[in-house]
Amino acid sequence: MNTSSYVTLVTEENGTLISMLGMHFERSYVSDIVVARIITMVTASDYRQRGIGRTLLKEAEKRAVEAGATLVVLNSGNRDERKAAHNFYESCGFQAKSTGFYKTIG
């Protein structure tokens, strides 16, 4: 990888932050490929359904390719209120493939 491990993309309108996407690059433990992992993505509710998120994802994918990544992954909660987000990710070409598990310790 010939780039920084972390990338933050933002969208502003009139000096106000309206969306952001954060990702980092990692080498897959099992397949020895570079993976771009989107760790956060949000668009202000008043700005949704305008193509902003799709534009952010396209730029993230472009940056991922430039970094040598061949896979982009992200996690999204499985709560009912996340269904619209899941539909959005699927419309952008992502496939639901895994379930995450979390445990608070300490």
Image (cartoon, rainbow, N blue to C red):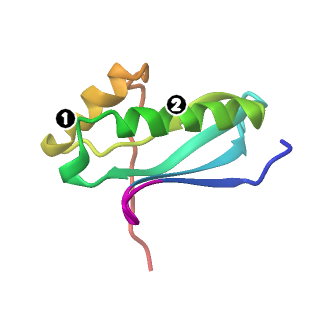
Q: Position of residue 61 (x, y in %)?
A: 59, 31
Whether residue 13 appears in magenta in the rendering, the answer is yes
Identify the residue at image location x=33%, y=20%: 91
CA distance for labels 2 and 1? 21 Å
Q: Which residues are magenta?
A: 11-18
**Residue type marked 2:** Lys
Identify the residue at image location x=52%, y=45%: 38
Disc number at residue 58? 2
Whether residue 32 appears in magenta in the rendering, the answer is no
Q: Position of residue 103 (x, y in %)?
A: 39, 62
Q: Quadrant of residue 34?
A: top right
Identify the residue at image location x=62%, y=27%: 71
Q: Position of residue 46 (x, y in %)?
A: 18, 51
Disc 2 packing (10 Å; few <14; some 14–19; many ≥20) = few
Q: Which residue is mark 1?
A: 83
Prevailing SS of the magenta stretch: strand
> Which sits in the foreground, 64 or 96?
64
Q: Quadrant of the N terminus?
A: top right
Q: Please, which residue is most extreme toward the left here? A: 80
Identify the residue at image location x=24%, y=47%: 47
Image side of residue 20 versus residue 70, left or right:
left
Q: Quadrant of residue 31?
A: top right
Name the element at disc 1: helix
> Which sits in the foreground, 30 or 53?
53
